[in-house]
Image (cartoon, grey):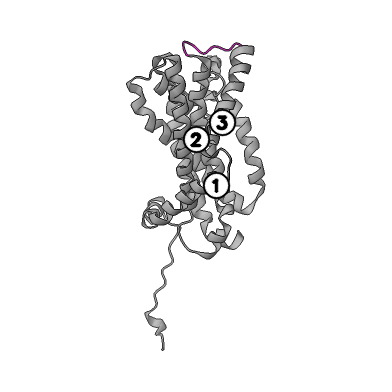
């Protein structure tokens, strides 16, 4: 059989825009579902306590922070029990760190798949968000139980919870796309991320209220996008009892969009090299 090469057309075009990439993700949505479900199963496979790890981690951290910051340091928590205030902040922080850690290592963990089969590579880090969502809702059930015990009731503000979750997703996924692309070339990022996240835990108002930061430093402090997210979560769940620095929330919204767009663009620009390097 002879092939007429004159009938073959090759189109060379620049890197695909983000809209085109998201369209490709939708076309490969069945693969997205498969990877997400596989990651959920793998996360809890051959573990003694299974999904309870999603509760043990924030619960133990809450106890330590309550003792250190609430009892020993005697930091204020307003009208909210210190443990509830900390847990309301641990939920978005754990959600952020789970997405960032999973997406950052996702390409390396799926090296055999990346090097053999074609599909939009961004599907792999995006699937990690689903696993983080499962952990979030398990830990959220623990927070609801604590709020019932202490008699803390959320108001209508809880309807804005998905909005603050979206900000956390954009921030963590955007940063995770950066790390995932860099991690393919420089595996040092795999070892560097735990230190960065541990450092960020104390730079974010998780174990304390952001209101203790002097007013002259609040704007600079809010350049950490998770500050506005955590304050927003507390306000959504605890109502007027949780003070919010609204300029910080607006900064978080803006930074989350910028980080996601830049992270996605950087990922797309380096995507063609993943199969050769990994």
The residue at 54%/11% (across/down) is: 76
Labels 3 and 2: the sequence-earlier one: 3
Please identify the quadrant where the N terminus is shown.
bottom left
Q: Which residue is mark 1?
A: 45
Q: Is residue 244 visible?
A: no
- Residue 75: in magenta span: yes
Report the mark closest to the observer, 2 or 1: 1
Report the mark closest to the observer, 3 or 2: 3
Please identify the quadrant where the C terminus is shown.
bottom right
- Distance from label 2 to label 1 (Cα)? 20 Å
* Residue 213 screen position, x and y as percent: 55, 17
Give the camera-side residue of 186 and 42: 42
The count of marks equals 3
Location of residue 235 with respect to 272 vertically, above or below: above
Give the camera-side residue of 116 and 192: 116
Give the camera-side residue of 132 and 119: 132
Q: Do the residues bearing badges 1 and 3 touch, measured as CB atoms within 8 Å?
A: no
* Residue 94 screen position, x and y as percent: 53, 33
Location of residue 8 with respect to 191 vertically, above or below: below
Location of residue 127 with respect to 171 vertically, above or below: below
Q: Which residue is mark 2?
A: 95
* Residue 129 screen position, x and y as percent: 47, 43
Q: Which residue is mark 3?
A: 56
Q: In the structure shown, which secondary structural element does the residue marked by tag 2 occupy?
A: helix
Q: In the structure shown, which secondary structural element does the residue marked by tag 3 occupy?
A: helix
Labels 2 and 1: the sequence-earlier one: 1
Q: In the structure shown, which secondary structural element does the residue marked by tag 1 occupy?
A: loop
Give the dominant element type of the magenta stretch: helix, strand or loop.
Answer: loop
Badge 1 crowding class, 10 Å Cα cut-off, few under 14, some 14 to 19, many 20 or more, is few
Magenta part of the chain: 73-80
- Residue 113: in magenta span: no
């Amino acid at each position: 059989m002879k092939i007429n090469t004159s009938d073959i057309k090759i189109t060379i075009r620049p890197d695909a825009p983000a809209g085109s990439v998201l369209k490709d993700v939708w076309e490969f949505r069945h693969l997205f579902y498969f990877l997400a479900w596989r990651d959920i199963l793998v996360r809890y496979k051959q573990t003694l306590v299974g999904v309870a790890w999603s509760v043990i981690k924030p619960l133990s951290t809450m106890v330590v922070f309550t003792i250190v910051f609430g009892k020993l340091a005697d930091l204020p928590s307003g009208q909210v029990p210190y443990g509830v205030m900390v847990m309301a902040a641990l939920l978005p922080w754990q959600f952020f760190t789970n997405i960032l850690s999973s997406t950052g290592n996702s390409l390396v963990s799926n090296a055999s798949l990346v090097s053999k089969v074609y599909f939009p590579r961004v599907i792999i880090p995006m699937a990690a968000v689903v696993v983080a969502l499962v952990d979030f809702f398990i830990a959220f059930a623990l927070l609801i139980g604590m709020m019932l015990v202490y008699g803390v009731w959320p108001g209508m503000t809880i309807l804005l919870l998905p909005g603050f979750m979206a900000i956390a997703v954009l921030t963590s996924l955007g940063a995770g796309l950066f790390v995932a692309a860099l991690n393919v070339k420089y595996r040092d990022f795999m070892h560097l991320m735990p230190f960065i996240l541990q450092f960020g835990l104390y730079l974010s108002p998780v174990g304390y209220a952001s209101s203790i930061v002097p007013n002259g430093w609040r704007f600079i402090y809010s350049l950490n996008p998770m500050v506005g997210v955590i304050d927003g979560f507390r306000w959504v769940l605890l109502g007027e009892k949780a003070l919010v620095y609204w300029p910080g929330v607006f900064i978080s919204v803006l930074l989350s969009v910028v980080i996601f767009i830049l992270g996605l663009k950087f990922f797309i620009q380096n995507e063609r090299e993943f199969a050769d390097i990994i």
